[in-house]
């Protein structure tokens, strides 16, 4: 079986990278993809440590240097790029070359609570300030505008009374870790979910395996 070659770009701790690595490892020989490269704009990113631990090649990215980013992706035969907490704008020549093959995960239900400056805790603060009863995780294609490309799938997460940005962030991150690897694997396998797929919400009171099974059923529809 030829497997899709994935690059992950990350600026931070890399828990979504880890979720992708773990999911593919759990699929064993049936995995449709391998992460062959992890790139970061920050030499101290935890994501790079996670990549090294997993034996994946790492690379330091100069964010505005489209030519070197494109070259590095090409040298590694990358077919699909997953942004996972990558805080820089990907230059247009690269998003165009990877149109339909570059995805991102965002910790809210886009198009709400996205765009320049809305990342990390700021997203959750904005959701709480708005009084929204639902947040969630969005996986979308990447274009040259922050958080703007076509939505692939959204996994809603309830906002609970008494939530603060930490508790909400943790619940949404749980949803990201369930959703993102499954969408990435589906894309890698050529089974892209219907665009804009609205999934049944995460049930925070159920365990991850149960939520994952529900998610997989909905993604397969
Ligand atoms: C996640 O919340 C992701 O949605 C956002 O940045 C965060 C990255 O977290 N784009 P991690 O580095 O994957 O732990």
Image: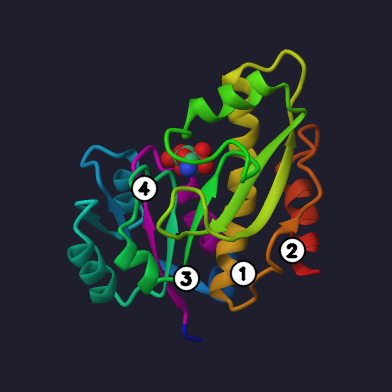
Checking the image for residue 219, the label placed there is: 2
Instruction: Tell which circle, 3 or 4, labels the residue nearer the N-terminal end.
Output: 4
Residue 72: x percent and y percent?
A: 22, 68
Quick check: 36 left or right of 159? Answer: left
Q: Assess disc 2: are there few (<14), some (14-19) or many (≥20) residues with their C-alpha within 10 Å of its C-alpha.
A: many
| Circle 2: element type | helix
Locate the C terminus by quadrant. Answer: bottom right
| Circle 4: element type | loop
| Circle 1: element type | helix
- Distance (Cα) linking label 1 and label 4: 21 Å
| Residue situated furthest bottom in the rendering | 1
Pointer 1 and pointer 2: residues touching (CB < 8 Å)?
Answer: yes
Q: Quadrant of residue 78?
A: bottom left
The stretch of residues the image draws in magenta is: 3-26
* Disc 4 C-beta below 8 A from ligand 1: yes
Pointer 1 and pointer 4: residues touching (CB < 8 Å)?
Answer: no
- Distance (Cα) linking label 2 and label 3: 18 Å
């Amino acid at each position: 079986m030829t497997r899709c070659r994935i690059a992950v770009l990350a600026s931070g701790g890399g828990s979504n990278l880890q979720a992708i690595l773990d999911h593919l490892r759990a699929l064993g020989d049936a995995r449709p993809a391998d992460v062959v490269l992890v790139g970061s704009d920050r030499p101290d990113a935890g994501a790079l440590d996670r990549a090294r631990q997993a034996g994946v090649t790492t690379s330091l990215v100069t964010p505005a240097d489209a030519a070197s980013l494109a070259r590095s992706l090409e040298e590694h035969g990358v077919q699909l790029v997953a942004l996972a907490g990558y805080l820089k704008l990907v230059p247009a020549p690269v998003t165009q070359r990877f149109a339909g093959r570059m995805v991102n995960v965002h910790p809210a239900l886009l198009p709400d609570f996205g765009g320049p400056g809305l990342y990390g805790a700021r997203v959750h603060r904005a959701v709480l300030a708005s009084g929204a009863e639902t947040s969630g995780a969005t996986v979308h294609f990447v274009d040259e505008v922050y958080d703007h490309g076509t939505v692939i799938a959204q996994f809603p997460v309830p906002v609970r009374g008494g939530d603060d940005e930490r508790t909400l962030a943790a619940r949404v991150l749980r949803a990201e870790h369930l959703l993102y690897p499954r969408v990435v694997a589906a894309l890698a396998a050529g089974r892209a979910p219907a665009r804009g797929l609205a999934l049944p919400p995460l049930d925070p009171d159920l365990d991850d395996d149960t939520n994952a099974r529900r998610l997989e059923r909905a993604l397969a529809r």
